[in-house]
Image (cartoon, helix red, strand yellow):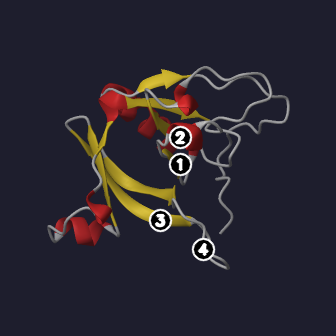
Amino acid sequence: MRGYMNKKGEIAIAFRSPWKRRWFVLENSEMTYYTSQESWQRGEKPLKGHKIDMREMVLMKDTDDGSDIALAHVDSDAAKPAVAGAKAGSGAAASGERVWQFVCESKAELDAWMRALVLHGARPRQKAPASSSPGFGGSSKLSR
């Protein structure tokens, strides 16, 4: 699968949104990302050389951090079952593993990415129910 998603950066920079629109390519259980579809078509290397192996990831949907999708390494604290009151991904810093966060541009794209990520090996994990958790609609949580 290929397409655009908004990815949250690892480091917050003052006065800049941490969210960047990136072109993602999911093939052979690995996801890479590029500045744009054009940069991928020109054969440029993936940004930061990242290849995210889906077979080592736990997939979380509708996380409390404002993202539609979060991916965490299977051994990270963030991938463990949610504890009442804890936010998805809250243990990632303790384990040293990055939690990848994404926002899709529509519910249809979200559903397609969720299916594709699982087909390529990501292990689904349901978020613990929270009364304040927003549902999914046609609009993105990302403010533009």
Answer above or below: position of 51 versus 37.
above
Q: Which of marks 3 and 2 is nearer the N terminus?
A: 3
Q: Nearer the viewer, mark 2 or mark 4?
A: 4
- Residue under label 3, please give it: 21
Indicate which disc residue 13 carries: 4
Mark 2 and mark 3 in contact (Cβ < 8 Å)? no
Q: What amino acid is labelled 4 in the image?
A: Ile
In this rendering, position of residue 43 left or right of residue 14: left
Mark 3 closeness class: few <14, some 14–19, many ≥20 residues within 10 Å = some
Local SS, label 2: strand
Residue 142 falls in which quadrant of the image? Answer: bottom right
Q: Earlier in the sequence, mark 1 or mark 2?
A: 2
Residue 42, x across and y down, in percent? 16, 71
Answer above or below: position of 126 versus 4.
above
Residue 129, x across and y down, in percent? 75, 23
Mark 2 and mark 1 in contact (Cβ < 8 Å)? yes
- Residue under label 2, please give it: 70
Q: Earlier in the sequence, mark 4 or mark 1?
A: 4
What residue is rendered at 36% in x and 60% in y? 23
Distance of mark 1 from mark 3, alpha carbons?
Answer: 12 Å
What residue is rendered at 61% in x and 36% in y? 91
Distance of mark 3 from mark 4, alpha carbons?
Answer: 16 Å
Mark 4 and mark 3 in contact (Cβ < 8 Å)? no
Q: Quadrant of the N terminus?
A: top left
- Residue under label 1, please give it: 101
Q: What amino acid is labelled 3 in the image?
A: Arg
In this rendering, position of residue 111 left or right of residue 141: left
Residue 17 falls in which quadrant of the image? Answer: bottom right
Mark 4 closeness class: few <14, some 14–19, many ≥20 residues within 10 Å = few
Local SS, label 3: strand
